[in-house]
Amino acid sequence: MKLKYLFDYFKYLENPFEALKFKFGVSENYTIKVKNIDSTVTLNNVKVLNHLMANLPKIKPDKIPNFLIYIKNRDNDDKYLEIGDIKFINIYNSDFIKNHGDEFYSHLIEFFTDDVFEILDYKGRHVVDIGGNIGDTPLFFAKAGADVISFEPIKHLYDLAVENVELNGDVKNKIILVNKAIGGKRGILHFDDSSIIEYVGNDQNHVMEVITISDLLEQFDFTPDILKMDCEGCEFEIILNSDLSMFNDIIFEHHQRIVDKDYNLLVNELKKQGFEIQLFELEGSDCKFEEQGMIYAHK
């Protein structure tokens, strides 16, 4: 693995020796020059270079220029980051990273590695977003023209999502954020009953209120149109225990590797409810589709 990592410097960079000199402390900064890409940025932090090289093989070529800007923004003292026209709090310059680690920020990398969500036109539509995380997906949908209701049960992620939505004043009125989980039945979920231990850390008292799709549509009077799910395995409970036929499009990430259930259970149930199915590999993931992948169900 270490040899492959070193080889990537020569595979992707026009100036690999300069990068390695910076990595090993011979030089104080490094100007990134990716092969076949005109954009360049200069780094002063070796950790950011490591982050660049860990992700560069996964980045879609047409998104590399914006990814370099994102990488550079992580390497400065700015309070905020921008990806396209979406603004986020730079957690590397906040207390969040000190308390929770940087695994949450990996979600933003998906802006540069996968574009499955871009297969839909969101203008004038309504999106139910299950798994809003730090506000990245609700902001993406709202910027694309949708009204969004987004559910994030983990409190500190929900709180960060609220802050990120506030930063984007042009669409904040198009987004409703809710600190609840969606499941197959209502109740209270304790952290050790779920697949999110890495998110809640050592918080032994972490609990989440769970409501159903039916509860959601009744309580919030929100038009069922597009359903998006990325909830670390809860898609099995939701799909196998819910009538989703009122939605026009459903796009979600399946996590067979987490719940150890065959993703075809989901495909077959959605077909029974009148949907056609398309399958997509996660381009930014090392997982095989059978372990984890995107499923798009449509009428």
Image (cartoon, rainbow, N blue to C red):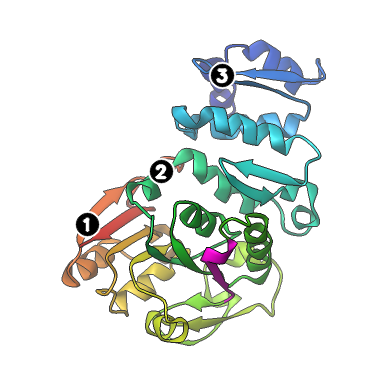
Amino acid under disc 1: Ile
Task: Identify residue for label 3.
Answer: 34
Residue 255, image x, y percentages: 41, 59
Amino acid under disc 2: Asp
Q: Badge 2 local density, few (<14 within 10 Å), some, or many (20+)? A: few
Is residue 74 visible in the rendered image? The answer is yes
Which SS class for mark 3?
loop
> Which residue is depicted at the point 32% across and 80% down?
241
Nearest the camera: 217 or 206?
Answer: 217
Q: Which residues are magenta?
A: 172-179
Task: Identify residue for label 2.
Answer: 115
Q: Badge 3 local density, few (<14 within 10 Å), some, or many (20+)? A: many
Disc number lying in front (2 or 3): 2
1 or 3: tag closer to the N-terminus: 3
2 or 3: tag closer to the N-terminus: 3
> Which residue is depicted at the point 65% across and 65% down?
162
Q: Badge 1 local density, few (<14 within 10 Å), some, or many (20+)? A: some
1 or 2: tag closer to the N-terminus: 2
Amino acid under disc 3: Val
Which mark identifies residue 277?
1
Is residue 224 magenta-colored? no
> Which residue is depicted at the point 62% across and 14% down?
16
Nearest the camera: 291 or 91?
Answer: 91
Q: Is residue 246 above or below residue 137?
A: below
Residue 8 lies left or right of residue 121; in this view the side is: right
